[in-house]
Amino acid sequence: MPEAICSDARPRGWRTHLALWLAVIGPGLVVMLADTDAGSVITAAQSGAQWGYKLLLLQAILVPILYIVQELTVRLGVTTGQGHGELIRDHFGRGWAWLSVGTLTLSCIGALLTELSGMAGVGLLFGVPRWITMIVLVSGLIAVVWTASYAGVERVALAIGAFEFAFLVVALRTHHPLGTIVSQSLQIPIHDTGYLYLAAANIGAVIMPWMVFYQQSAVVDKGLTTRHLGLARIDTAIGAVITQLVMAAVLIATAATIGRTNPHAPLNTVQQIADALTPSLGETTGRLLFALGMTGASIVATIVVSLTAARGVGEVLGFKHSLEHHPREAPWFYGIYTALLISGGVLVATNVNLVRLGVAMEVMNALLLPIVLGFLYMLARRTLPEPYRLQGAYGTFVLVVIGMAAGFGLYAALNGIAVA
């Protein structure tokens, strides 16, 4: 564990403060880069293609909601030193813990299939068969996690996740009048079931069950304490802005191209999405930028969701579930992680409809939000020490925000699912 994290001394001077910041930063950025996963990219692309800029405002609204949710996981992690599943088990019982981890596992499996399908699609862009992509990807990710510490895995995830900024380049190269973007983003056809379905998918693409579990476990693995809470909040806030900028970039790019010229054109494969996103960049440059962005989105999320599922089961059953443990010390943790990746790779080697799968998984996340956010709020009210407890006016505000987010996500999903 880094000395800067272990030390209780207050930082002295900008160099020490910078060293502490670099030691603390990571969990928030990693989970937010994973948040903009293949399913999220697909959902944003479909949103822009079908509705132009009418779902752009929602991307901005979701920034503070995402931060509020994930900040609670940071607060729980640094004050209790326990993962999310452990806290639910200890304070609500094993049955409720299994319900929570069950929703987590369902979300993780769906996300994993989406991420691996995204990478298979990227391979097909360059003529690489699905099975070769899966062998290379799954083998590489198993090797990284089995041989690296938490810090090593985090550095790999941040480096690969930086490729997602390629989507910002794509969006900046598209051209559409600012007035059109603003006026259209304020048009909200709330009674249209097709719009509601994609609105639910966007909410589910931003607030996911596995994010809550992962970031809480990550701050514990990293050894963060209440002394690091302020910097950890900044880490989370920066990540929340970045992930929504990427979502907005994909939406703007598709809205300015296929959404303007042919909004009913099919987006059923990675090839079609790439063609829709990059018409102004040239075939080679466009494919390369899209491939980089999708690779960053998919690989980071694959690491995160696989580790989160293994950790969640470990927290409820009580076996060792940290990257700080050697595989010989935590065989079940590493075994579940490996089994998930291999099983997912085998399934994705078959022909999976990436777009339908990706959007459906995000809608499923929206349906699970009441359970996930309900447990998060109750833990923040019951388990946090007094100085950090969710209470008073802010506690009421958080309840209203997550209640509206979960409620609208559920409403939109149930009303829009008929058109899926």
Image (cartoon, rainbow, N blue to C red):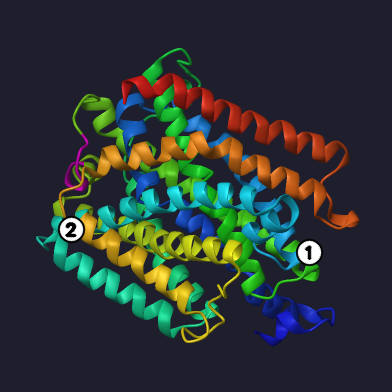
- Label 2: few (<14), some or many (≥20) within 10 Å? some
Q: Which secondary structure lies at badge 1?
A: helix
Q: Which secondary structure lies at badge 2?
A: loop
Three-letter amino acid code at the position of disc 2: Ala
Q: Is residue 185 visible?
A: no
Task: Tell me which corner region of the image, top left, top right, bottom left or bottom right, holds residue 66.
Answer: top right
Q: Residue at x 15, y 64 (%)?
A: 131
Q: Which residue is mark 2?
A: 349
Q: Earlier in the sequence, mark 1 or mark 2?
A: 1
Q: Residue at x 45, y 36 (%)?
A: 202
Location of the C terminus by quadrant is top left
Three-letter amino acid code at the position of disc 1: Thr
In this view, the residue in front, 31 or 88, is: 88
Q: Is residue 213 visible?
A: yes
Q: Residue at x 45, y 48 (%)?
A: 107
Q: Please state the extent of the stretch shown in magenta in the rendering.
A: 267-272
Q: Residue at x 66, y 36 (%)?
A: 402
Percent position of residue 256, x then y = 31, 33
Percent position of residue 127, x then y = 9, 60
> Separation of disc 1 and disc 2 at Cα?
43 Å
Location of the N terminus by quadrant is bottom right
Q: Was residue 283 drawn as part of the magenta stretch in this picture?
A: no
Q: Is residue 339 above or below residue 387?
A: below
User: Which label is found at residue 306?
Assistant: none
In this view, the residue in front, 243 or 340, is: 340
Q: Which residue is mark 1?
A: 79
Q: Which residue of the protein is positioned furthest toward the top in this rendering?
A: 191
Q: Is residue 220 above or below residue 374?
A: below
Percent position of residue 319, x then y = 57, 73
Left of 357 or right of it: where is 221? right
